[in-house]
Image: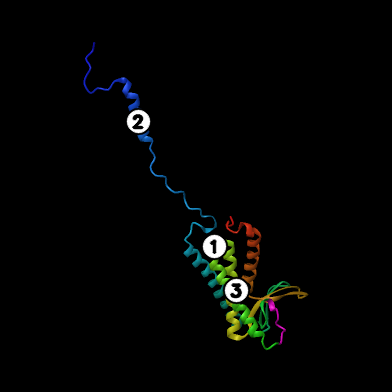
Amino acid sequence: VAPVRLGARRRGDEVPALLAGAARRRRVGPLRPLPADTRGGRGVSPVRLRALYLALAAGVVLLDQATKAMIRAWVPLHDRIVVIPGFFDVTHVQNTGAAFGLFAGATSPYRPILLNSVAFAVFVLVLVYAFKSPVHWKRLQLALAGILGGAVGNLIDRIGTGSVTDFLRLHAADRWEWPSFNVADSAITVGVVLLALDILKNPASEETTPES
């Protein structure tokens, strides 16, 4: 009989030892979190998103005021510059009414006060709604940024001169004409369209779910 050395492993003990070693090698460390969901802006800091939307609104105001200043400096009042014959002109109109010339023919002495009050109320309501709404709802925040920037752009004109400078004119061979408008009006229109689309895409029953 072969002598048995002290401390040597028997063959029957090797299998459990190998299994134990394999189990140790298979141990997985702590699970790492999944990457943040970037859909709808969730991967970006809310503060940065908020600053981005405010910067967009400020950009609308700056572009609106810059274009109006150029028109007042370079295009005489009621003059026109043909850009696309029979369709698009650059003009210079001082609008004492609301957007797209609404209420321009009203003669009430309270018209300026009423229009300025409405414009300021819209500014406050949109600003409050923007800050109370989820910042990662891109479509809604873009809509509110456009409306906010447009409202401020036209409000600056009303407070400064009592009228708004309009200079974009669309028409069909002078037979049909859309009321003259400006960058602020365009931003408000785009914002309202996006807001309507957001309401259709996110009904009240799904208000907590951001759009994809």
Q: Secondary structure at mark 2?
A: helix
Q: Residue furthest right?
A: 175
Q: In terms of depth relative to the viewer, which is nearer, 181 or 132?
A: 132
Q: Give the image quarter of residue 126.
A: bottom right
Q: Residue at x 61, y 70 (%)?
A: 187
Question: Closer to the N terminus: mark 3 or mark 1?
Answer: 1
Q: Main secondary structure of the magenta part?
A: loop
Q: Is 173 a magenta residue?
A: no
Q: Measure how far apart labels 3 and 1 are at the Cα level.
A: 21 Å
Q: Residue at x 67, y 85 (%)?
A: 111
Q: Report the span colored magenta.
A: 100-107
The residue beneath circle 1 is: 134
Q: Residue at x 54, y 55 (%)?
A: 39
The residue beneath circle 2 is: 20
Please name which of the two marks, 3 or 1, marks the residue nearer to the observer.
Answer: 1
Instruction: Indicate how the structure is coloured in the image.
Output: rainbow
Question: Closer to the N terminus: mark 1 or mark 2?
Answer: 2
Question: Closer to the N terminus: mark 2 or mark 3?
Answer: 2
